[in-house]
Image (cartoon, rainbow, N blue to C red):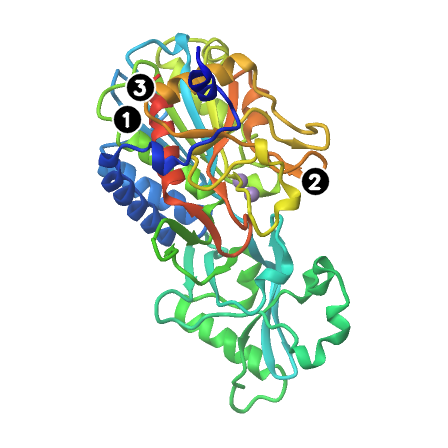
Amino acid sequence: MDAKEWKKTILTEKKNGYDRMPAGERGDMDRYCEAYKAFLDAGKTERECVSEGIRLAKEKGFQPYVRGMALKTGDKVYLDNRGKMLMLAVIGQKSLAEGAQITAAHIDSPRLDLKPAPLYEAEELAYLKTHYYGGIRKYQWVTIPLELHGVVILKDGKTIRVAIGEGNEPKLVINDLLPHLGAEQSKKTLAEGINGEQLNLLVGSEPMEGEEKDRVKLAVMKLLYEKYGFTEGDFISAELEAVPAFNASDIGLDRSMIGAYGHDDRVCGFAALKAMLDLEETPGKTAVCILADKEEVGSMGVSGMQTGAFDTFMEDLCDAQGVPVRVCLEKSFCLSADVTAAFDPNFPDVYEKNNASFLNYGVGLCKYTGSRGKGGASDAAAELVAYTRRIFDENGVIWQMAELGKVDAGGGGTVAAYMANRNIDTLDAGVPVLAMHAPFEVVSKLDCYMTYKGMAAVYKN
Ligand code: MN
Ligand code: MN
């Protein structure tokens, strides 16, 4: 090889995805990103993402899975686990004894959950108390418009869907101190400037006529009853989530990026879902897509990735073919799709450039996650990384390696370990995100689209 040839093999000589993407793909990328933005606007909670996912799946001929149903090659099924986790499968040409091609992402995002007894009045202003969900930087959640989405379940089992703040509806907000009086607060660290018990949503100020005590709170309660039909006691059996009141929008004068709430991890969840819905031919192996809940708090519980519901679903699919599920799992491959931290030139100190992911360099492959000595990581085998880079290259997927920050700067983990613990060969991959976990996160359109292409490559291989 001459010097020019050798240069092509150099890892650190990276090339922007726009220099590598075929010109003909721009239209597909833009169409895909419009569909993704619509999905984000329709799904601001895990429950809404499941509903929207089912709606899209039904459009493409997916049927609800019923235990014991006969399954033949090409059948498309979905299973709604308690309205918070969605599992889909396309039955492949080969036996499940040869394994399945699985993608797993999560559809829960950081937010502020209402406490069980949230409503109170202070100095004739009404507030809702929250308990934040997932790793948030609390100071980012004040002085922005918020919406309240979720469900209230009445004692008789009736479900009331709540979505306050959409469109022309009133918004909610958490206030911060004015700078004129903020001198003492400004001396605190970012982590302490706003504390958890200050994350109280302002929800009303007009008193109820004729009352003396708690009259603003009573007026708010009356409004909720008139519009939604629930009373204060029903907050106890509710899941109401305060989420940012902004829809997804293009970012940049060139519209090359998308800003939105909840990219983590709906950006991978939608890619995994859409690639499955768009399968035009029956894949060789059975394709499985898992959109899980509770990742932001540890993936536990009946709807998190550690749930037995996944094992049961896989066992049911295997039973239909008389295959022991353990035989299927040990031959399966899982792409655990979750976002990674994009290199941010504003904060270069926490990244290590040679191994960081960059906007517009494609879907990031993470051999391992974890923090401080790979703690808590699912460290994928080198064989698995080789397999994935091969199928990505063969399918025109632009990709990059991604490590989440400098060694000892921090770290993170996701559902990969829980898939790998089940004896499934699992590799992490995902979209690089700027300002991850902020109420408004930024991703690049090219990376979104390449993640979708990567998911399609997994299903087909
Ligand atoms: Mn995530
Ligand atoms: Mn996260």
- The residue to which callout 1 is attached is 76
Residue type highlighted by circle 2: Ala
Please state which of residues 153 and 250 is positioned toward the viewer in this rendering.
Answer: 250
- Residue farthest front in this picture: 2
Residue sitting at x 52%, y 36%: 357
Please state which of residues 314 and 401 is positioned toward the viewer in this rendering.
Answer: 401
Q: Position of residue 174 (x, y in %)?
A: 58, 69
Where disc 1 sits, the SS reads strand
Q: CA distance from mark 1 to mark 2?
A: 44 Å
- The residue to which callout 2 is attached is 409
Location of ligand 2 given as a quarter of the image:
top right
Q: CA distance from mark 3 to mark 2?
A: 43 Å
The quadrant of the image that shows the N terminus is top left
Q: Is residue 315 visible?
A: no
Q: Position of residue 407 (x, y in %)?
A: 69, 34
Residue sitting at x 40%, y 19%: 101
Residue 5 left/right relative to 204: left
- The residue to which callout 3 is attached is 91
